[in-house]
Amino acid sequence: MTEADGRRRLRVRLLGPFEVRLGGEPIVVSGPKQRILLAALALFAGRDVPVDTLARAVWGERTPSRAKASVQTHVMRLRQQVGDGAISTGRDGYRLAADPDDVDVTRFAALLRRAAAEGDPAVERALLGEALALWQGEPLQSVRSDVLLDEHVPQLVESHLVAVERRVDLDLDLGEVDGVAGELTELLVRHPLREPLWERLMRVLAASGRTAEALAVYADCRERFADELGVDPGERLRALHLELLNAVPPDDAGEAAEPPALVPRQLPHDTTRFTARGAELAELDRLLEQAQPDATAIVLIDGTAGVGKTSLAVHWAHRIAGRYPDGQFFLDMRGHSGDAPVPPEAALDTLLRAAGVRPDLIPSTVEGRSAMLRTRFAGTRTILMLDNVATAGQVRPLFGGPGQLVVITSRNQLRGLVARDGARRLSVREFSAAAAACLLAASAGDDRIADEPDAVTELVALCGHLPLAIALAAEYVSRFRDNTIAELVDELRDERSRLDVLRDPHDEGTDLRATFSLSYNALRPEAARLFRLLGLVPGPRFDLFTASALDGRPRTRAALDELVAAHLVNQPGRGRFQLHDLLRAYASGLAEDLDPTERRAAIERLAERYVLLAGRARSVLSRPPRLREVVDIDRELDGVPEFDGHGDALRWIERDRDNLVGTVGLAAAHGLDDLAWRLAWLLSGAWLILHNVQEWVSTARIGLACAERLGDGDAIFLSLNNLAMAHTEAADWGEVRACFERALANRRARGDREGEAQVLSNMGAEPFRHGDFEGAVRMYEQALAALPEGGGGLFRAYVLLNLCGSCAEAGRARAALSYGLRALPLFREASERSYEAICLSNLADACVALGDYDEAMVYSDRSLEYFRELGRGRQIGHALVVRGRILHAKGQSDAASEAWREARELLRPLDDRRLPELDALLGDQGSGVGT
């Protein structure tokens, strides 16, 4: 999400939990002063805010002596977090360069102005509704500025209440009052002495035909005013009360003045720390609006254990309770608990009794009880909340018919309820980083959260953004006030003990391990076994191939689907799966208890398939001469796919990188040394292309250790060469030389001249990287001379290519051209498109040096075509440098600059060695550079 000028769009929310999004992604603004600054700027979005105003917001009346410099420092820090372009400097202050519509406060004010100017009541009502939907709680939460809170919050709250009152007036005029009573009741909890709210609640109830409740509301209001203020309600309220009394028929007046009949109100209490589910609440409202009026409205809220399904359901049910005046019923169906699930017949008995049916009149069969429940609820508007449901069959007999809202929470997806019964599903996900920080702050306090922003970020990540885990962590932080949050983070880093820290030993409902166990114990044996084995997956994500390899049995897909349906495994996309961080910790604990033989066999199956798949990927990306000595890529193995070109192979390695790296370590740790060193070697080609140096070095080290344990000379040689090339990319030249010296001795001891040539050729990288191109040429010439006469095959082409590039850099263009032309047909014969492209680029460079620009352009066009086809960012950048030189030499300066700018854009994220050259070329445009 970007602006027209390329800046990422900044959005700020102040009407509720403080939230910042940059380019659509939530960010955490660390540091309380930076949050205050951003809030102050956002309150005046699009306008200059004087430095003095900002200083008062941050420091109150005790501003520092050098306030301007201090503000400037904090603005600089804020810019580092939200982007330089987000805050502009004006003559006397700073301005938030955000669209006013991207700041909820300014958008709210704009919508109110439009509503006030609107002559059509329906349009005015819609604009007010849009404005009020921006409010997600008390304004300026987590913004620790007394000045902003004192000067802005009262005004914002007043505007909000006036807008609500005006919209309710329009609701009454248009006869649209469903749900309004509940909204007003909730507001009166926070503003119990605001007479306009009491008045409108009475009018809404009366308009809904609930005059008795309206009169009871007046009695509550009068009692509250007398107790707290010692006065009666105002004249308008008294007049309304009299009006309602006069509207009641004489025979019913006495009854109307009495409190309404007892109606079931069984919803659990709403949490006082309900946080950051504004989007979910809006979606639930939308789902309810879509329900058919002549059918039971069924809303299914599903999600993994601890994600906050019940809290969300209860909070929403309380918000809309006013629309369902005939009762709110609640049942814990115990689908995942230590007790047996509640059967339908028992649930029906409980509901009928709660609805006022005498026990002796309740039928004995499920069918009879279900029919009586439907009869009892006919023509009424009720909420039935069924919490912790295990299966669709457990709740189907409980549905009461039109006018009823059924709210179901479950750890299972209950797909049948959606497919057969028309349930509308909301799947609850983990908290965002900003929402998680708000939940922590609500318990631990804003000060502690603001003082340790980095620790808070890591704490939230270790909790997997799971609300229950974050709430437990917040309780821990508030309990140990003398300890830092960083100390808790240290404890939680150990995955094996993390679930033991996040628990209350006296409350099973807050014991994450026990909570997860309830879902796990409900699985069928095949799915339970697969879940244990998934604890071995090294990375957070996996695919069906990985799961099948670990499982080693048919019907893996069915077992995996059961885990997805139970929310023990997430499925973010087709064919892709992941374990929530804390569920992965739980599964890892189960995997540790596997029989050692079963665990090793599963890892062996996974490593064996990864070796074959990595071999096939390596054969597509590049074909090292010894590839078939390491792996038989033509071997048939169930479930191991083929790759459709370079891009497909690279995407697989990037996607499964964590699992591939982790499997090298797993295989080594379980004595599977032969598979470990092979996988490490096979991945090296991809690491080179992707510039994944850290992964390359770590896997190559493990591979060498495994080869040495095996005592296999060829494996040791290949692993030494692999580690040396990894250290080359890391520019760790001491390690490079040590590995190559051992590799060279290894090959000479075996009389392997081609292997010796390979080491010598690789050793040429060090002088080349240091700009000693003549030294590199000498090393490559030694490698060429070491090759057997007429032998070397494809490896001879690699050495010739290295000579071509080094000679070109050394200014020996004719020699470069000669070497390149000898290498080119060898690469074409072997269908080595990637190295053919490199060779073409080197030939273009040589032709530029020789002044043959037309021939250079031919080579350049073909090399760029091949590199773009292969998706090789670094090589595209290098080829564009050459192309720019050709264009510049042909007098096409603008086109040359365009090529160099594209090259710099590609190479900058890679910190490429040619960046200084590009900066010089672009800086010296028109000075003859490159001619």
Image: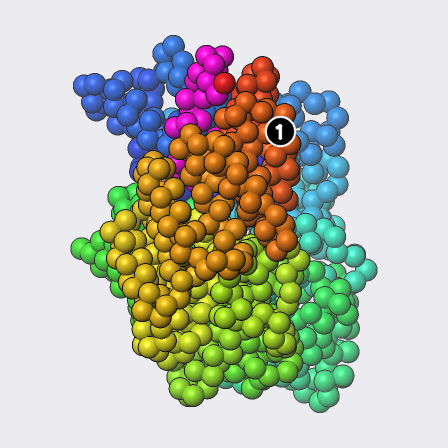
Q: Residue 78 appears in which quarter of the rendering?
A: top left
Q: Is residue 552 left or right of residue 744?
A: right
Q: Main secondary structure of the magenta part?
A: helix
The residue that appears at 48% across and 40% down in the rendered structure is 804
View extreme (top): residue = 91
The x, y position of residue 794, in whole percent, is 54, 56
Q: Which residues are magenta?
A: 901-930
The residue that appears at 35% across and 37% down in the rendered structure is 774
Which SS class for mark 1? helix
Residue 770, relative to residue 283: is it above or below?
A: above
Q: Is residue 194 magenta?
A: no
Residue 455, relative to residue 82: is it above or below?
A: below
* Mark 1 surroundings: few (<14), some (14-19) or many (≥20) residues within 10 A: some
* Nearer-the-camera pick, 558 or 133: 558
- Residue 911 seen: yes
The x, y position of residue 63, in whole percent, is 23, 22
The x, y position of residue 899, in whole percent, is 56, 26
* Nearer-the-camera pick, 24 or 533: 533
* Nearer-the-camera pick, 584 or 68: 584
- Residue 694 seen: no
Q: Is residue 928 magenta?
A: yes
Q: Residue 55 appears in which quarter of the rendering?
A: top left
The residue that appears at 47% across and 83% down in the rendered structure is 601
Which residue is label 1 attached to? 855
Q: How is the image coloured?
A: rainbow
Look at label 1 and name its amino acid. Glu
The residue that appears at 37% across and 68% down in the rendered structure is 751
